[in-house]
Image (tube, rainbow, N blue to C red):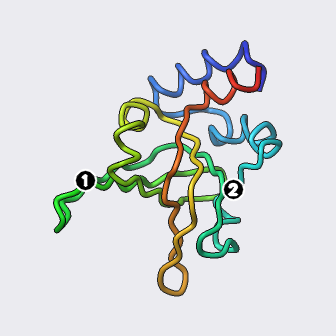
Amino acid sequence: MDRKDLDPFLTEFDLMQVSASPHVMVSFREDLEKCGFIKSSSLRWKSDGSLIKAAGRVVIIHTPPTRSGKRVMFLTMEDEDGLFDLTVFENIQARYAKKILSNTVLLAEGVITRFGLRGVSIAARRLWTIREFYEMEA
């Protein structure tokens, strides 16, 4: 995506939560793939413990009470191929909670956690916004 188009596009999407164009991630996919980001459809083929990068629109943030009393954020993210889960543990939240709660599109680096036959989640290690991604690329 051209840098001059980034801010108006994201501002419109943040305000309206809808876009008349294809999925919000389609505009960024080529640049993301160049930097090793994978689509949600590729997650199921990654082995437990793999370090990956994924990006998507935040659909739901859920912070249920835990038995230990530690706060864990569970995010449901969406890219142009579907939904995926991102888990953000307390130590990571301390650094990234403001970004998580105030941005529509997030990029994550994390470790694949597999559970059950098809269950896959990403345990976040690092998060950044799409704006930060393009600032790093400049």
Vertical comparison of 11 with 84: above or below: above
Q: Could you tell whether 81 is left or right of 117 in the image?
A: right
Residue furthest out toward the bottom: 117
Question: Which dot marks residue 39?
Answer: 2
User: Looking at the image, which residue is at 44% across and 23% down?
Assistant: 15
Q: Position of residue 61 (x, y in %)?
A: 35, 48
Q: Residues within 10 Å of mark 1 (few under 14, many from 20)?
A: some
Describe residue 4's horizontal placement relative to residue 11 as left or right: right
Mark seen at residue 101: none
- What amino acid is at disc 1? Arg
Residue bearing mark 1: 71
Q: What residue type is labelled 2?
A: Lys
Tell me where residue 46 appears, x and y as whole percent. 68, 71
Q: Position of residue 74 (x, y in %)?
A: 37, 56
Q: Is mark 1 on a helix, strand or loop?
A: loop
| Quadrant showing the C terminus | top right
